[in-house]
Image (spheres, coloured by chain):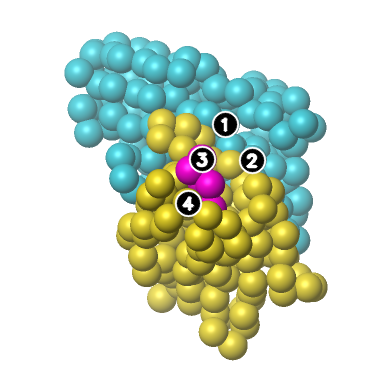
Chain colours: A yellow, B cyan
Amino acid sequence: AQSVTQPDIHITVSEGASLELRCNYSYGATPYLFWYVQSPGQGLQLLLKYFSGDTLVQGIKGFEAEFKRSQSSFNLRKPSVHWSDAAEYFCAVDPGGGADGLTFGKGTHLIIQP
Amino acid sequence: DTEVTQTPKHLVMGMTNKKSLKCEQHMGHRAMYWYKQKAKKPPELMFVYSYEKLSINESVPSRFSPECPNSSLLNLHLHALQPEDSALYLCASSQGVSGSFADTQYFGPGTRLTVL
């Protein structure tokens, strides 16, 4: 079955430390991949996306993600987190392209320790 | 500018009320979406409009009625809702490319709906 998995429900990181959030997908072909961030009670903000080409993509707020076809993964990274990065992070896929819906992972809640 | 606006921010309604949620974008996007998000859950797709025509309805109950009066505006009409319909309702828009080409969705801030 097609799915998006974010294995970590919660992650706690100290401020200034590095961060990696995991995302795995299960689709027949390479889907279009996205990372969104959601602060409490807010909408979703697009951090970055992968469509094709260079497998390391840069996003906003210092985030990057690496697409690894062999591992069906699209992990999000940041070298040094800030307290303002505390939020819910969603990995999403669009398996078919075009104007159809996104399928989201269950999300990872990021907690930043001072 | 990638702004999608939604009104109202908060809405409280009784089960017999009729209300509407509004979503607007001025990016020239031709696809618009409604998602429902329950607390501590990911968004779930409800409807997709492409070029002002309903293209996807994810088996949503008829008490939710979408409307796309023009390419910039998307409404969600609510009637006879149940308490379990309380959620954050998110609107999104995208260019609306056809076929298997990539399309990026931009989300609004959402409307927090409480049904009493």
Q: Is residue A82 magenta?
A: yes
Q: Nearer the viewer, mark 2 or mark 3?
A: 3
Q: Are marks 4 and 2 on the same chain?
A: no
Figure quadrant of residue A70: bottom right
- State which region is magenta: A81-85
Q: Are marks 3 and 1 on the same chain?
A: no
Q: CA–CA distance between discs 2 and 3?
A: 21 Å
Position of B68 relative to B58 (above/below): above
Badge 3: how crowded within 10 Å, few (<14), some, or many (20+)? few
Residue drawn at point x = 20 percent, y = 18 percent: B116
* Disc on res. B108: 1
Task: Say whether residue A84 is left or right of residue B37.
Answer: right
Q: Toward the viewer: B45 or B12?
A: B12
Badge 1: how crowded within 10 Å, few (<14), some, or many (20+)? many
Q: Main secondary structure of the magenta part?
A: helix
Residue at the disc numbered 2? B106
Residue drawn at point x = 41 percent, y = 57 percent: A13
